[in-house]
Image (cartoon, grey):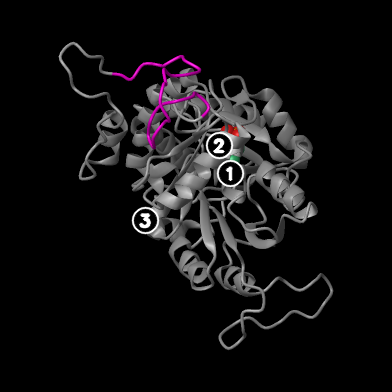
Amino acid sequence: MTDSAPSHLALATIAVAAGRPPRVEGGPVNVPPVLTSTYVSTTAPGPGDLFYGRNDNETWRALESALAALEGAAQPAVAFASGMAAVAAALALVPRGGRVVMPQHSYGVVLGLAAELAAAGDIRLSLVDIADTAAVVAALSRAPAAPGAPGEPAGPGVPDEDPAALLWLETPTNPMLEVADTPVLAAAAHARGALVVADNTFATPLAARPLTQGADVVVHSVTKYLAGHSDVIFGAALTNDEAVRTRLCSHRTVHGAIPGPFEAWLVLRGLRTLALRVERSQANAAELARRLSTHPAVVEVRHPSLPTDPGHERAARLMTGFGSIIGLRPAGGAAGADAVVSRVRLWLPATSLGGVGSSLERRRRLAIESPTVPDDLLRLSVGIEDVEDLWRDLDQALRG
Ligand SMILES: *Cc1c(COP(=O)(O)O)cnc(C)c1O
């Protein structure tokens, strides 16, 4: 249907060129939104035939091939109605009762879904500090001891009592920006037969490509950087494994969390500028983090670009960018943080992230946020505006 960009091209070029329609004289240069619920069909549909709009759509296909080219996936992406729909399909790969090892600071709604599945007996859940590689490897072999019970020593020679079925990775984590050692953790998970799923929303393929570091499945909240303009909710899952892709597609078809063709077109339009947006927002974020780290009204700033940041060394080694999310604890506790949010004029006080416009929010105002996230933590999503304008607005809001 569409030509996929050859893999020798740079990612910035792939973002522009992948998923275009075939070159035919007089043909369009973009795949249009194909607004149809069904397709003409008189015989039994074969594999790959367009048949019904809940199963497949030409506009999905263009986007799915572009996302696969960006993530380096051997199979087209599977587009979903939201990031959470993609997450739900990935968690459904776990066999009933299988144990899932997950970062304690995963995106709050992902933790909420995992807790719901655990309460229903569909999965068992082990929450870990994903930056603590030894603790994650130990949790892949056996369920952590119940609180208060004597812990078992981790390390070589201790048998696998309860090998995990799935390792969930989110790196850097939302909103604590912990960085995981993806290749080491993926190898440890595979040695125990566990599947590895990486939520690559924060990094984007420009800063990390988990499928090339051992992940079996990548999920995205496409809503964020990939779409990039805060105007669409969308998700995607990617894998190299045809059988896994078939299961993800089947989950989408039978549960029905399908994206609209227009939304797919909008995402592909946004994707064309991904590299420019990410380069600018990452540069802005690094500069703001540097200035914030000496600001008198700041208690703590987290961004993997800072040489003093706990995630810096690992991010510098494993990633090709430091991302555009900053964790900021202003002076004055939660009230001080709320005051900053109320005083900004250019920054948008709003949830979500990854849009062209900079936004910020105090995460713990939300009931879904983990209690281990500091009450005064502001999550800043840095956009593509002029960095001096962003700094002036933030500085006046911090000074009050
Ligand atoms: C926003 C987000 C999600 C959920 O995606 P939606 O598109 O809002 O459904 C999942 N993971 C991460 C890391 C996110 O930031």
Q: Which mark is residue 89?
A: 1
The amino acid type found where label 2 is placed reads Arg
Q: Is residue 6 magenta?
A: no
Mark 2 or 3 closer to N-term? Answer: 3
Magenta range is: 30-54
Considering the image in quadrants, where does the N terminus appear? Answer: top left
Going by the numbered disc 1, the residue's amino acid type is: Ala
> Residue 387 appears at what percent x and percent y?
44, 29
Q: Mark 1: give few (<14), some (14-19) or many (20+) Cα within 10 Å.
A: many
Residue on which the image places disc 3 = 212
Image check: 67 left or right of 179?
left
- Contact, mark 2 vs mark 1 (Cβ under 8 Å): yes
Residue 251's place in the image compared with 314, above or below, is: above
CA distance for labels 3 and 1: 21 Å
Query: Mark 2 sits on what residue?
Result: 252
Q: Residue at x 15, y 14 (%)?
A: 25
